[in-house]
């Protein structure tokens, strides 16, 4: 008697997108940096002590139209005395991680030289700092306090694990903070809570995931939405079936090595 061997047909590929989809643009590193600086008002200022050792302090700041941070510091503080001696400095600004991983959120380092403004520039610096820190309105008039502008020479943006890029100082100065950033978190939550069906339709019709079963918005900016899509499409097969639980690790390592093979 001849055995009846039935060969299963491979699953049909997902249908093509309903319309040609184009990769959505993303914010440049300069735009990311400007958006972070505009959205916050507290950072870590690094200066150089008299012996050349680095000294980091928490400071408040405002920012000028070109993104230059404006500080109001006292010579009673070591960082204030350091700036009078050596104007080299850097400022780190980070997004709020909330309950999440603080290393998986955006942050930027701005490095350059600080200067004491005068004339119209002093007026602009004072207005920028007070707009961000209203309670500092009187501090600049105290004898030990002075306004400083950090002229940015280097910019390094990190968006979380595996996302990082430098930006030219001129590109940073010319970029604009994202205008939707102040409402982005609220808009994201609204989309996820009330418009899950619309997000799924976007994933299927506009992002090419025609077999998606669900979609959530992870974040959004002036250029578009970041969607986290659930789909059965992404499946990778082992070289051969795993016969024992103890062999699972070895099989997975083999896949990883195959994936990294030139």
Image (cartoon, rainbow, N blue to C red):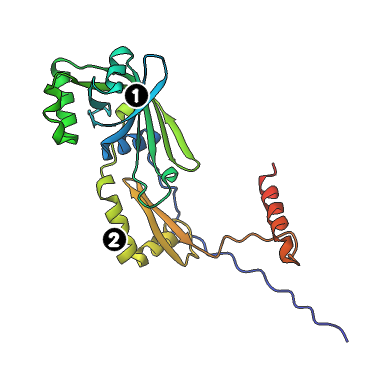
Task: Compute the Cα span from label 2 to label 1.
Answer: 36 Å
The percent coordinates of residue 81 (x first, y second) are 28, 17
At a point 43% along the width and 37% down the height, the residue shown is 158
Task: Give the image quarter of residue 113.
Answer: top left
- Please identify the quadrant where the N terminus is shown: bottom right
At a point 44% along the width and 53% down the height, the residue shown is 21
Q: Which residue is mark 1?
A: 170
At a point 18% along the width and 19% down the height, the residue shown is 144
Of 147 and 183, the residue lying toward us:
147
Disc on res. 154: none
Of 193 and 118, the residue lying toward us:
118
The percent coordinates of residue 210 (x first, y second) are 48, 63
Which residue sits furthest top? 85
Horizontal relation, residue 36 to residue 128: left or right: right
Give neighbour class at mark 2: few <14, some 14-19, many 20+ (Cα, 10 Å). Answer: few
Q: Nearer the viewer, mark 2 or mark 1?
A: 2
Q: From this viewpoint, is residue 176 visible?
A: no
- Please identify the quadrant where the C terminus is shown: top right
Of 50 and 42, the residue lying toward us:
50
Q: From this viewpoint, is residue 13 visible?
A: yes
Q: Is residue 70 above or below residue 193?
A: above
Of 44 and 188, the residue lying toward us:
44
Give neighbour class at mark 1: few <14, some 14-19, many 20+ (Cα, 10 Å). Answer: some
Horizontal relation, residue 133 to residue 213: left or right: left
* First of labels 2, 1 by sequence position: 1
The percent coordinates of residue 35 (x first, y second) are 31, 38
Q: Which residue is mark 2?
A: 190
């Amino acid at each position: 008697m001849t055995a009846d061997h039935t060969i299963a047909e491979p699953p049909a590929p997902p249908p093509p997108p309903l319309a040609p989809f184009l990769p959505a643009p993303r914010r440049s590193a300069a735009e990311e940096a400007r958006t972070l600086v505009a959205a916050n008002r507290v950072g870590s200022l690094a200066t150089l002590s008299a012996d050349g050792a680095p000294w980091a302090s928490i400071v408040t700041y405002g920012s000028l139209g070109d993104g230059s941070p404006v500080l109001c510091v006292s010579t009673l503080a070591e960082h204030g005395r350091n700036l009078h001696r050596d104007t080299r400095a850097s400022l780190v600004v980070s997004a709020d991680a909330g309950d999440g991983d603080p290393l998986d959120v955006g942050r930027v380092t701005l490095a350059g030289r600080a200067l004491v403004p005068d004339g119209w520039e002093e007026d602009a610096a004072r207005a920028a700092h007070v707009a961000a820190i209203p309670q500092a309105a009187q501090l600049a008039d105290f004898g030990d306090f002075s306004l400083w502008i950090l002229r940015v020479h280097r910019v390094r943006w990190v968006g979380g694990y595996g996302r990082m890029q430098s930006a030219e100082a001129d590109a940073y100065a010319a970029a604009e903070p994202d205008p939707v950033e102040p409402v982005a978190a609220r808009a994201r939550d609204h989309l996820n809570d009330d418009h899950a069906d619309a997000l799924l339709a976007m994933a299927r019709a506009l992002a090419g995931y025609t077999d998606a079963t669900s979609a959530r918005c992870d974040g959004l900016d002036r250029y578009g939405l970041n969607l986290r899509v659930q789909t059965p499409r992404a499946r990778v097969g082992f070289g051969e079936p795993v016969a024992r639980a103890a062999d699972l690790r070895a099989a997975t390592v083999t896949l990883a090595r195959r994936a990294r093979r030139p």
